[in-house]
Image: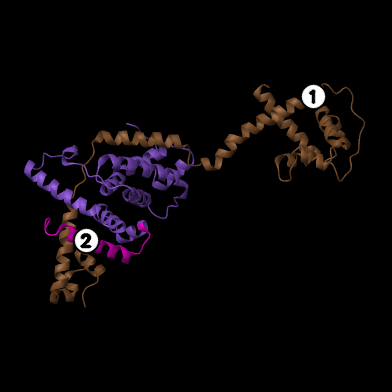
Chain colours: A purple, B brown
Amino acid sequence: MRSAEPGLSDLDERALVEACLGGQSAAFDVIVERHRRSVYLLCYRFVSNHEDASDLSQDVFLRAYRGLRSFRGQSSLATWLYRIGVNVCLNRVSAKKPLSESIADRQFVDETAESAPDRLLKDERGARVRAAIAQLPRKQRATLVLRMYHEMSHQEIADVLGSSVGAVKANFFHALSNLKKMLGGEVL
Amino acid sequence: MHLRPDELIDVAEGKRAESSATHLAECAVCRLHLAELKAMMSAAADVEVPEPSPLFWDHFSARVHDAVAAEGSPRRSFWIWPRLTLPAAAVALAALLLAVALNTGRVEAPAPLIVPDPLSPVASVDLLSDPQSTSDTALTLVAELSSDMDFETAREAGLAARGSAEHAVTHLTGSELRELQRLLQEELARSGA
């Protein structure tokens, strides 16, 4: 495991950014360690497969590193990374149809807590919902992902997407309505 | 009048009590909309992301670390130019100084002082009339070689375009030239040339 230099892991976000800009590249390792899971999960929600989510997450951090000087601290580092992540993912899903992993490829889920038939049913239902989410217009998809899976406030989502709170709520409403149209009663 | 999308979202998310929206009690359409929104939120919330292996995170961090290392410092846009060009410039200037120093050995006697036409010389500094400059053989040689060079000749030779480094160097004062010489000699001494 790559461990951060002593003291760096105690620094707050702003200090870590300053340390990076001051030439301490190890400070960026700490930033990655703190945010890698949430960035990966964000990417996975967009592309629905591990390989692409992993590559996109790396791209997010690389872009963040390149643009670190532009981070002003007006939003949290997490929000800033989400903004980069959403842009990277939306560009990616525009260019390439999302590939869903087959259920057999999903090796990492703990399957001990549920019986096999229950797990299978849940996986199938989840796959249908994911496929429907993948069909949503870009902003609706981004809004739904950030709201449902990252528990971001409407204001934070508006900051990430560069829109208003009203627009975020309207996008969320239409995203859910479109999901209903696509899924019908099959998941209800 | 039906509830607006943002009002329905607020109620569906529990930010606004259903009882506060009195319209809901009398509108079956809005109640249906609300029920569907809640059902879709529940269906979406049930979709899990397979958690990667703990080993994946170390591998991922290492990949990002290597990619970032290949990028260089985020400050590099400020520093890349001087980092790359200063050594090259120092070497070039050192080579120039070395060439001048070697050439001075072939100068057997200082040429007679020539006062150049003030409108035509390239260099604005009259090195030949500067007592400190004339005591320096390298500067004397440069001054001699350039003293009778008119502007057209210099321009045809591609020398001293206004705004160029050469132009700046040829417009240094005598004391600035001596400082430049001292710096170059230091650089030569450091590099062992």
* Coordinates of residue B54 in the picture (x, y in percent): 25, 35
* Coordinates of residue B120 in the picture (x, y in percent): 85, 43
In this view, the residue in front, B2 or A100, is A100
List the residue tagged with mark 1.
Answer: B103
Mark 1 element type: helix
Dominant SS of magenta comes to helix
Looking at the rendering, the stretch of residues picked out in magenta corresponds to: A161-188
In this view, the residue in front, B157 or A120, is B157
Which of labels 1 and 2 is toward the front? 2
Location of residue A99 by image quarter: top left
Please report, as a chain letter, where disc 2 is located.
A
Q: How many marks?
A: 2
Image: A151 above or below A36: below
Where's the N terminus of chain A, which quadrant? top left
Residue closest to the far front: B156
Q: Are marks 1 and 2 on the same chain?
A: no
Q: Is residue A9 visible?
A: no
Mark 1 surroundings within 10 Å by alpha-carbon count, few (fewer than 14), some (14 through 19), many (20 or more)? few
In this view, the residue in front, A81 or A100, is A100
Q: Is residue A88 visible?
A: yes
Q: Residue at x 29, y 36 (%)?
A: B57
Where's the C terminus of chain A, which quadrant? bottom left
Mark 2 surroundings within 10 Å by alpha-carbon count, few (fewer than 14), some (14 through 19), many (20 or more)? some
Location of residue B124 by image quarter: top right
Mark 2 element type: helix
**Label at residue B166:** none
Please report, as a chain letter, where disc 1 is located.
B
